[in-house]
């Protein structure tokens, strides 16, 4: 992933130094587990653990140099370990296959990446919750099909996002649990040269579960579940972004991304304040969906394993988690700094001359004893006239004898009170917030 979208903590997790450090820990834990089973001299395991050192840039460069000759990354890594740790390093990797190291190491990286993403999601959800409570009574028009519908509050819009982010968290937690699975079962998963106790010990030491059954690899449906969860989270972030983008449109102007001092919107037009953050996150969501598609393609491998998944994972593992981490942080900043124009919301609510209260009139007429079809026809006739002439719907209805006869003028007036439509808002807030 390019540096523009890479935050430091997540970038370090996917560095070559960190990857080799994790591989070394896998090998040392395996050696210690073998010693506990009497397969390796205990003093050798202790000596190798004591000889552990911090992988640095020169180690990375040397491993790359060896790999250029061997054309095999794990062999290059083991060769370097033997040179640095001495002859006892021959006891490393006994009975193991490369994927024992690769898949177990990848499980650690993905687990740590998911922990960072979960922390980022918690920060975003908290920010959304704060804004939802702040605007629980900020009245605005609801829209369906992009057309004015009935009054809502901006807090309810945010509450929908808040609840959805909670569901996304549960999906991510399940995916994190699934992908946190290692294996040390050998070339085709039969434990031909190592007992299962070694695998169990290694995975427990590393904070992983061991796969109950594997072939040469941990099965990729686990990884696909994780990438699909990230894509699903990306879809929610995109939903939030798209709605903020619409609300920022000049014609709407109800909500705006934060615009910092010194920021520029356009190289040509000094007046511009563009929703660049939300547009960026819309693009990020597209990438996250593409990574999920690639991960699903990785599930079907030949027999006990082929290598077609490897090149894919070298790209999508870092890219998807780095981008998701970045997207959560960026959306959190947007939500925290959101500019909400309550006056504009009230203006837009009134701009259709009361049309948004048409259902209230319809239901009042039905409750007063009028047949629904007749009531619908009367209200729609007045509403369409309001659309065409721009005259207030309430005024038109007050001139309709049948409507006034059924409801009275006070009854018509009561239909245009937004507070009546929003009376149960607090129940919704209580229902969502108590569900946490």
Image (tube, grey):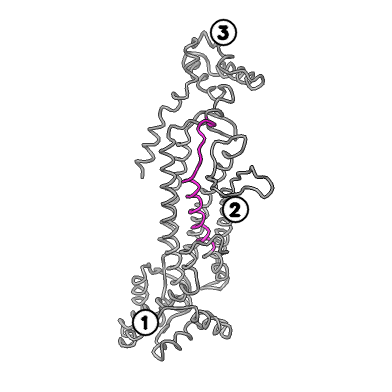
Q: For mark 1, does the 10 Å Cα neighbourhood hold few (<14), some (14 to 19), or many (20 or more) residues?
A: many
Nearer the observer, disc 1 or disc 2? 2
Residue 192, quarter of picture:
bottom left
Where does the magenta region start and end? 319-345
Secondary structure under tag 2 reads helix
Residue 361, given in percent of the width and then of the height, sits at 52, 19
Residue 23, given in percent of the width and then of the height, sits at 44, 76
Which residue sits furthest right? 268
| Dot placed on the residue nearer the N-terminal end, 3 or 2 | 2
| Dot placed on the residue nearer the N-terminal end, 1 or 3 | 1
- Quick one: 91 or 117, which is closer to the camera? 117
Q: Residue at x 36, y 36 (%)?
A: 430
Residue 68, given in percent of the width and then of the height, sits at 58, 83
The answer for how far apart the CA atoms under marks 3 and 2 are is: 55 Å
Q: For mark 3, does the 10 Å Cα neighbourhood hold few (<14), some (14 to 19), or many (20 or more) residues?
A: few
The reply to whether callout 1 and callout 3 are in contact (CB within 8 Å) is: no
Q: Residue at x 59, y 53 (%)?
A: 283
Label 1: which residue? 31
Label 2: which residue? 283
Label 3: which residue? 401
């Amino acid at each position: 992933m390019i540096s523009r979208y890479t935050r430091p903590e997540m970038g370090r997790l996917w560095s070559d130094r960190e990857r080799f450090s994790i591989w070394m820990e896998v090998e040392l834990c395996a050696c210690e587990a073998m010693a506990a089973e009497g397969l390796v001299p205990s003093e050798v395991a202790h000596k190798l653990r004591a000889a552990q050192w911090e992988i640095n840039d020169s180690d990375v460069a040397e491993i790359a140099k060896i790999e250029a000759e061997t054309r095999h990354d794990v062999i290059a890594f083991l060769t370097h370990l033997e040179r640095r740790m001495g002859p006892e390093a021959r006891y490393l990797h006994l009975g193991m296959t490369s994927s024992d190291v690769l898949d177990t190491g990848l499980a650690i990286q993905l687990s740590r990446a998911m922990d960072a993403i979960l922390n980022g999601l918690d920060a975003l959800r908290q920010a959304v919750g704060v804004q939802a409570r702040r605007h629980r009574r900020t009245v605005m028009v609801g829209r369906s099909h992009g057309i004015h519908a009935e009054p809502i509050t901006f807090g309810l819009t945010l509450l929908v996002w808040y609840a959805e982010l909670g569901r996304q968290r549960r999906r991510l937690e399940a995916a994190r649990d699934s992908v946190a699975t290692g294996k040390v079962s050998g070339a085709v998963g039969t434990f031909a040269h190592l007992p299962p106790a070694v695998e169990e010990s290694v995975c427990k030491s590393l904070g992983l579960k061991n796969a109950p059954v594997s072939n040469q690899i941990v099965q990729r449906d686990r990884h696909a579940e994780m990438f699909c969860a990230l894509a699903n989270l990306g879809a929610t972030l995109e939903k939030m972004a798209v709605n903020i983008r619409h609300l920022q449109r000049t014609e709407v102007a109800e909500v705006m991304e934060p615009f910092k001092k010194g920021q520029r919107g356009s190289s040509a037009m000094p007046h511009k304040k563009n929703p660049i953050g939300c547009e960026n996150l819309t693009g990020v969501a597209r990438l996250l969906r593409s990574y999920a598609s690639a991960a699903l393609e990785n599930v079907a491998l030949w027999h006990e394993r082929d290598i077609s998944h490897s090149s894919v994972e070298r790209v999508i593992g870092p890219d998807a988690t780095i981008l998701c981490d970045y997207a959560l942080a960026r959306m959190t900043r947007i939500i925290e700094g959101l500019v909400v124009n309550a006056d504009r919301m009230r203006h837009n609510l009134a701009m259709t001359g009361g049309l948004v209260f048409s259902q209230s009139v319809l239901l009042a007429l039905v409750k007063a004893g009028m047949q629904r079809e007749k009531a619908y026809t009367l209200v729609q006739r007045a509403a369409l006239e309001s659309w065409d002439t721009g005259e207030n719907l309430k005024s038109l209805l007050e001139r309709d004898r049948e409507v006034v006869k059924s409801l009275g003028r006070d009854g018509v007036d009561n239909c245009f009170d937004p507070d009546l439509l929003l009376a149960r808002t607090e129940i919704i807030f209580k229902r969502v917030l108590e569900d946490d």
